[in-house]
Structures are given as C-alpha cells and as structure tokens.
Amino acid sequence: ARGSVIKTRPGEVEATIARMQSLWKTIAPDESPLVFTSLAEIYRDIHKEEFRTARIVSVFTWISMLLSCMGLFGLAWYSVECRTKEICLRKVNGATEKQIVLLVCGRFVKWMIWASLLGIPIAWYLANTWISQFVYRAELSPWIFIMSVLLVIMIGIITVIRQSWYAATLNPIDTLKTE
C-alpha cells in the first residue's frame, strides 16, 4: 500500500482533493482512483477502543455516583433519625445550628476521607496498569487524585447537608415531648 501525507490549508480540503484526483487521472488513467483519509480519521480508528472504553467508564461512573449519593443520603437520614433525641438535647443545652450541622457532616466527612485514603492506592495501581499498555503515556499527576478526593468530599457534603440542616432546625420541644 502506497501512501502520501498532504497538508492543506483549513477550508481548502475539498478543493485540494479535487485537484489531486484530476492530476491522478491525467498521470495514471488506468490506475484505481485515489483514496483520501484524514489524519483525524486514522487516529479515530486507532483509538476507537479507547473512546468506547471511556464512554462506558463515564456512564458507569455517573451511575455509581448517583447510587452512592442516594445511599449516602439514606444513611444520613437514618443517622439523623437515630440521633434526633441527642441532637435536640444538644440544642437545649445551647448548641447552635452550625455546630449541629458540623456534628452531623463531620462524621460523614471522616468516613469519606478514610474511603478516599483506601481508594487512592487502588486507583493509582489500576490507572498505571491501564496506562502501561500505551507506548506514549502521560504521567499520573498527584493532583488528579487530590482533586478527586476534594470532589468526593464536596459531593458528599452537598448530599448530607440537607439532612444535617433538617436536624439543626428541629424544634426540641416537639421531639422531646414524645419521650
């Protein structure tokens, strides 16, 4: 298979192809016509499997994030329900809404940090294993993992904040009246 690489100016691709085909017909009329492929198409064909893998990983990432947020929300709800009496007693004894929100959110943030510390080495290993199959590879920056941990904590706080605010604004009289 013979091939040539031709660089064209943007917007002149079709005109250049037409000129090349007419030149080819005058030079070699008995030969088969020229086949033109852009470099972008060649790269797309080479990396088709990586693009497919990236799409699949992206879809499952969103699904797992949604399920994780739902589970975290349910866990926060259950935690607040189990600790309603304790939270109301803290309010009666002078705890502010901010302190109660920090109390409820702080517990979940600690668990998210521990989970992240456990997950980072696993993610580092899996990413290095995947990248090692490429001839030209980018180095993994620690900032990717730091930003991931911060994003996880931020999403977790956003998920838990509603329930912690609900606990902080409870009327202690209504809750303790039933006890």
Image: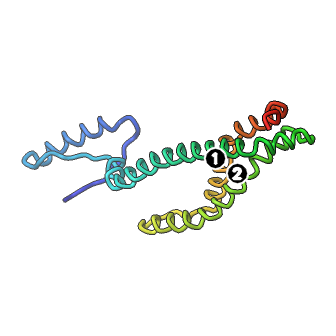
The residue mark sitting in front, 1 or 2, is 1
* 110 or 139: nearer the viewer: 110
* Residue occupying the point 14% across, 43% down: 26
* Callout 1 crowding tier (Cα within 10 Å): few <14, some 14–19, many ≥20: some
Residue reaching furthest to the right: 94
Residue 31, given in percent of the width and then of the height, sits at 10, 49
Q: CA distance from mark 1 to mark 2?
A: 9 Å
Per the rendering, the mark at residue 62 is none
Q: Is residue 168 above or below residue 24?
A: above
Kind of residue sitting beneath label 2:
Phe
* Helix, strand or loop for disc 1: helix
Kind of residue sitting beneath label 1:
Leu
* 102 or 149: nearer the viewer: 102
* Residue occupying the point 64% across, 62% down: 142
Residue 82, given in percent of the width and then of the height, sits at 71, 45
Q: Quadrant of the N terminus?
A: bottom left
The answer to the question of whether label 1 and label 2 lie on touching residues, with beta carbons closer than 8 A, is yes
Identify the residue position indicated by label 1 in the image: 75
* Helix, strand or loop for disc 2: helix
Per the rendering, the mark at residue 108 is 2
Q: Quadrant of the C terminus?
A: top right
State how many labels appear.
Answer: 2
* Callout 2 crowding tier (Cα within 10 Å): few <14, some 14–19, many ≥20: some
* Residue occupying the point 68% across, 50% down: 153
